[in-house]
Image (cartoon, rainbow, N blue to C red):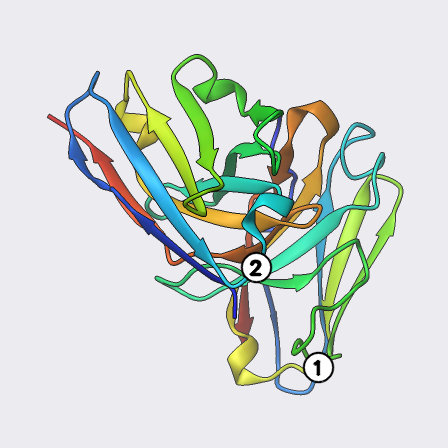
Amino acid sequence: QSALTQPPSASGSPGQSVTISCAGASSDVGAYNYVSWYQQYPGKAPKLMIYEVTKRPSGVPDRFSGSKSGNTASLTVSGLQAEDEADYYCSSYAGSNGYVFGTGTQVTVL
Amino acid sequence: EVQLVESGGGLVQPGGSLRLSCAASGFTFSDRWMTWVRQAPGKGLEWVANIKGDGSKKNYVDSVKGRFTISRDNTKNSLYLQMNSLRAEDTAVYYCAREFWGPECWGQGTMLTVSS
């Protein structure tokens, strides 16, 4: 049950795009199409932004998109806005081991 | 509207016990897997345990196996986490969440501090 690997930080100017990677293993990210992404502001609960690799819950802007290739998933935020500055976490279903989260990425809007 | 409200956190001495509760509303509680996730101060998210809608299946992260027990009472729309043999490293905000192939809707969290 090792944590998924994310870059500690990412940044971009308003209007630009930023992509966050989430590296797992053949037993979690690579095995299932059940990768989710969460946005978390300081002191607040996480919010689901992407589920089942590419799907967006109602109310999440289409600026947020997800993808997966092999054992690595990615979250792309297009048209960066100041409100996108937050921590982002990926998670993956891991079968009998339940779920595993990523190490988290702090996104800064320059 | 889905609502999840955790309670029961507090300060506990190492080796002590505590039970967290999560009151659910706004959906058919018994139909859904539920999960506990924790976040140590300044750290990332860690999945802790989950339980099937009818309570028949439970899973735990290795670090809490044998110490924590997840349970639910579908007549009260409530989820629980019984925590025994608590350690300093269990100090965290504990969130309950409804699952949909991953934590979906989250509560606001309850803080557990394990310290002497």
Q: Position of residue A72 (x, y in %)?
A: 80, 45
Provide the secondary structure element on which disc 1 rests.
Answer: loop
Position of residue B52 relative to residue B29, above or below, is above
Residue closer to the observer: A77 or B69: B69
Position of residue A2 relative to residue A39, above or below, is above
Q: Is residue A6 visible?
A: no
Position of residue A83 relative to residue A67, above or below, is below
Which residue sits at x=27%, y=46%?
Answer: B111
Please tell me how crowded label 2 is: few (under 14), some (14-19), or many (20+) other residues with Cα within 10 Å. Answer: few
Which residue sits at x=24%, y=42%?
Answer: B9
Q: Which residue is mark 1?
A: A16
Q: Is residue A65 visible?
A: yes
- Quadrant for the C terminus of chain B, please: top left
Q: Chain of mark 2?
A: B
Residue closer to the observer: A61 or B98: B98
Q: Which residue is mark 2?
A: B27
The residue sitting at the left extreme is B116
Q: Position of residue B61 (x, y in %)?
A: 54, 25
Which residue sits at x=22%, y=37%?
Answer: B113
Residue closer to the observer: B81 or A26: B81
Q: Position of residue A89 (x, y in %)?
A: 59, 53
Q: Nearer the viewer, mark 1 or mark 2?
A: 2
The residue sitting at the front extreme is B75
Position of residue A47 relative to residue B102, above or below, is below
